[in-house]
Image: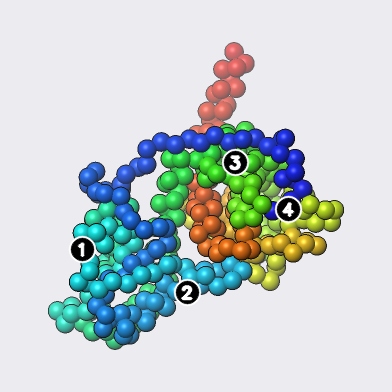
């Protein structure tokens, strides 16, 4: 990225990593081997007649649906297919498996989940039914549920990895500035500090991945509507992310932004995803953000990941940054109490 701010690397803080052994499983045997495959890869196990029929078409539509918020169409998942005859002690180690079984013994179509059976981490979605027509309809009816299940599973896995191995320099800076905790990938080593604004990038010229965190005073619930959110984002980014020349700065492409309300660690959050662009420059890419309420300090904390990689596919990059957003831990009542006790001790 040709941001002016990258030219002043003298002020950049070089990050160090905190890496502890990966939590091996969530309920499987300690002897379970590590799963194969990459994040957001799904292997479908189905006989060729099923894969080439109604059921195969239905499950392909589920997995091939485009991920919202990218500048070009990219499928939500990378899929592969094998027949039951090739499902063995090697292929059953895959991280995400959809196992389809058509048999008249199954009176109604069903979807059942299993985790960490042959490897860790692993999700197996078993779909069964008496015939292709009923199973195909059942898959179509549960399209969003299957997509969300696979997405959340991968987000949780990557978030756990970041808890175990993350940029501790950035996390310490987040604690100092915001009283929060945020675990980000270790390769985002270049850290820049602004006023109530902190960001880190991998410092590349292209293939850039960045994460920012900033705070705003809580004014009203309208801050969690799309238009006010975009206006606030534009103001913050213009002040903190200038381009390489005067009059250049990051802004939101208002035509391509989607928002929805979600739950993060049990609390309300607004997710926004869409496209950013550089004002007066031919730069842009996808972003995803979470806006959450810090009730202890009566403010809104926003965390965002963004990508600039014009020559690359961006799904995997933005998804990794999205997982980091879920690691944000806001101040709690217990934290506030501990802070008060520490102040009392210092006075003594």
Q: What is the distance, in whole Å, between disc 2 and disc 4 at their CAs?
A: 33 Å
Q: Quadrant of residue 127?
A: bottom left
- Image location (x, y in percent) of residue 333: 52, 37
Residue farthest top in this picture: 348
Q: What is the distance, in whole Å, between disc 4 and disc 1 at their CAs?
A: 49 Å
Asked if labels 1 and 3 touch by Cβ distance under 8 angstroms, the answer is no
Q: Residue at x 39, y 69 (%)?
A: 79
In primary-sequence order, the first of circles 3 and 2 is 2
Q: Residue at x 22, y 66 (%)?
A: 87
| Vertical arrangement, residue 320 with respect to residue 295, above or below | below
Residue farthest left in this picture: 105
Q: Is 290 in front, or is 308? A: 308
| Residue matched to label 4 | 2
Residue 65 is tagged as 2
The answer to whether residue 150 is left or right of residue 286 is left
Q: Quadrant of residue 145?
A: bottom left
- Image location (x, y in percent) of residue 51: 30, 80
In primary-sequence order, the first of circles 4 and 1 is 4
- Image location (x, y in percent) of residue 309: 62, 60
Asked if labels 4 and 2 touch by Cβ distance under 8 angstroms, the answer is no
Q: What is the distance, in whole Å, between disc 4 and disc 3 at their CAs?
A: 17 Å
| Residue matched to label 1 | 88
Please tell me how crowded label 3 is: few (under 14), some (14-19), or many (20+) other residues with Cα within 10 Å.
many
Q: What is the distance, in whole Å, between disc 3 and disc 1 at their CAs?
A: 42 Å
Residue 201 is tagged as none
Please tell me how crowded label 2 is: few (under 14), some (14-19), or many (20+) other residues with Cα within 10 Å.
some
- Image location (x, y in percent) of residue 133: 29, 86
| Residue matched to label 3 | 189
The answer to whether residue 3 is left or right of residue 124 is right
Please tell me how crowded label 1 is: few (under 14), some (14-19), or many (20+) other residues with Cα within 10 Å.
few
């Amino acid at each position: 990225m040709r941001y002016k701010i990258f030219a002043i690397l003298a002020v950049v803080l070089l990050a160090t990593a905190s890496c502890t052994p990966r939590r091996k499983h969530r309920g499987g045997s300690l002897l379970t081997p590590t799963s194969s495959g990459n994040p957001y890869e799904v292997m479908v196990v189905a006989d060729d007649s099923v894969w080439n029929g109604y059921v195969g078409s239905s499950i392909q539509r589920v997995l091939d649906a485009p991920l919202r918020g990218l500048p070009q169409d990219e499928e939500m998942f990378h899929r592969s297919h094998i027949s039951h005859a090739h499902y063995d002690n090697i292929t059953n180690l895959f991280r995400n498996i959809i196992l389809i079984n058509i048999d008249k013994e199954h009176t109604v179509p069903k979807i059942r989940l299993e985790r960490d059976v042959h490897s860790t981490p692993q999700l197996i979605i078993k779909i069964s039914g008496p015939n292709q027509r009923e199973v195909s309809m059942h898959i179509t009816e549960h399209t969003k549920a299957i997509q969300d299940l696979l997405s959340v599973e991968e987000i949780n896995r990557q978030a756990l990895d970041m808890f175990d191995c993350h940029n501790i320099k950035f996390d310490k800076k987040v604690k100092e500035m915001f009283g929060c905790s945020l675990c980000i990938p270790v390769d985002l080593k270049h850290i820049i500090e602004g006023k109530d604004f902190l960001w880190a990038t991998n410092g590349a010229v292209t293939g850039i991945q960045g994460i920012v965190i900033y705070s705003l005073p809580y004014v009203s619930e309208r801050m969690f509507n799309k238009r006010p959110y975009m206006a606030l984002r534009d103001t913050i980014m213009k002040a903190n992310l200038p381009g390489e020349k005067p009059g250049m700065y990051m802004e939101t492409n208002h035509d391509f932004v989607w928002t929805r309300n979600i739950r993060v660690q049990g609390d309300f959050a607004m997710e926004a995803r869409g496209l950013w662009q550089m004002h007066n420059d031919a730069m842009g890419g996808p972003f995803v953000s979470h806006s959450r309420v810090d009730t202890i300090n009566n403010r809104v904390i926003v965390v965002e990941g963004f990508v600039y990689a014009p020559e690359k596919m961006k799904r995997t990059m933005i998804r990794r940054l999205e997982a980091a957003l879920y690691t944000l831990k806001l101040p709690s009542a217990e934290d506030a109490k501990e802070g008060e006790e520490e102040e009392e001790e210092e006075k003594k």
